[in-house]
Image (spheres, rainbow, N blue to C red):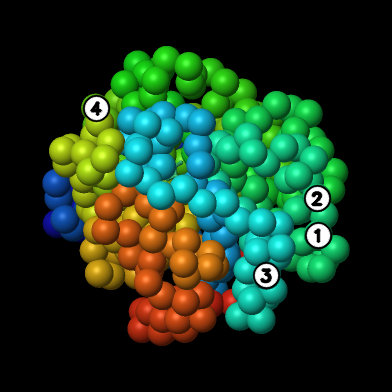
Amino acid sequence: MNFLKTINPYRNIIDRLKNGKSVHREELRMLLETEDNEILEYLRQCADDVRRKIYGNAIYIRGLIEFTNYCKNDCYYCGIRRSNQNAERYRLTGKEILDCCKMGYKLGFRTFVLQGGEDNYYSQEHICDIIKSIRKEFPDCAITMSIGEKTRDFYEAMYEVGANRYLLRHETANEKHYKKLHPKELSLENRKACLFTLKEIGYQVGCGFMVGSPWQTTDTLLDDLEFIQKLQPHMVGIGPFIPHKDTPFGNRQQGSLEMTLRLLSIIRLMNPHVLLPATTALGTIHPTGREQGILWGANVVMPNLSPADVRKKYLLYNNKICTGDEAAECRSCLEKRMQSIGYHIVVDRGDYR
Ligand code: 5AD
Ligand code: FES
């Protein structure tokens, strides 16, 4: 029997992934498609082990400041797309953003993520002024930007005044799939080029995708994994697709918890050092989604630091959690949630190791 166990092809693939050996596309396909729960539990344990060896039971927090929900893009999946007339739009001022950081700092945050729709109201100069003010007040913190596709010049200017990290999900690495999720003015080619440019400039970069987006297949997921191997990002953000009623995908099925968890483990094994958030979307589709995300290999949580009155307006998808809670409540809630599974939140920038 022991002999049979050692030659289980699925375990063998997982072991090779864990040991940094190369694994073929067709073998990854087997991991994405297996319905064997014992194999999946083995995958989870290996991912948890690998993460534990590098990061212990430390969980890093990033304070998310959603500073504008205006967006010039019209992605078919997104609740703040420009065509959504029902979205109540808002913008935060530089002072309001800085106030969020001050409150976050007191709560133990050492990374601030400034995320927004692609909103040209904020010029390069305006954004750089905001970054400068945060950099001046918090020299010990990491500043992460997540404001979409910009020019190299814009990216360089932000880096020069103190931004260190950039999140830009690639959404899907498959050309045909990308076209089905986005209007024609957006291209996968430019998206990828932005990511490589950001990396060249010196940013720590995060890419990522939604799990279970319409028309996603095992093959498009394999393309995502391949792209991640090529880009070698510092972070990978994945969360389930969740329909938003006022979008063209309002009646589509949401992505599954199981597939998101499975992908977290695979990505952890393929990139042992990567920073992997257990996303708000994961917490939205299951009451303990984020905790499960950690147990399957994630090591980051990104609670919201935005002012309470705008929380309900930054709705990329329906039923988003934490929109009624103050930052301090989310902070202590997450602390408890992490402790309940044997992990703890650290006050640390949580740089890529
Ligand atoms: N469901 C889940 N995630 C979504 N995002 C946008 N719309 C949705 C949705 N309906 C994700 C995208 C984007 C990130 C900020 O949020 O991947 O890059
Ligand atoms: Fe926001 Fe629990 S994390 S209330």
Q: Are marks 2 and 4 in contact (CB under 8 Å)?
A: no
Q: CA gap, disc 1 to disc 2?
A: 6 Å
- Quarter placement of the C terminus: bottom right
Instruction: Please indicate whether residue 243 sits to the left or right of residue 61 in the image.
Output: left
Residue shown at 30% from the left, 25% from the top: 219
Q: Can you say whether 154 is above or below 206 in the image? A: above
Name the residue type under label 1.
Ser
User: Mark 4, mark 3: which one is toward the viewer?
Assistant: 3
Query: Mark 1: which secondary structure?
Result: helix
Residue 345 image position (x, y, % from top left):
53, 77
* Residue to which mark 1 is pinned: 133
Q: CA gap, disc 4 to disc 3?
A: 41 Å
* Quadrant of residue 248 within the rendered picture: top left
Name the residue type under label 4.
Trp
Q: N-terminal of the two: label 4 or label 3?
A: 3
Disc on res. 86: none
Query: Mark 3: which secondary structure?
Result: helix
Q: CA gap, disc 3 to disc 1?
A: 11 Å
Instruction: Please indicate whether residue 23 sits to the left or right of residue 155 in the image.
Output: left
Nearest the viewer among 257 and 184 is 184
Residue 344 image position (x, y, % from top left):
50, 80
Disc on res. 215: 4
Residue shown at 23% from the left, 53% from the top: 258
Residue 30 image position (x, y, % from top left):
24, 36
Q: CA gap, disc 3 to disc 2?
A: 15 Å
Residue 136 image position (x, y, % from top left):
85, 63
* Residue to which mark 2 is pinned: 129
Q: N-terminal of the two: label 2 or label 4?
A: 2
Label 2 CB-ligand 1 distance < 8 A: no
* Residue to which mark 3 is pinned: 99
Q: N-terminal of the two: label 4 or label 1?
A: 1
Name the residue type under label 2.
Asp
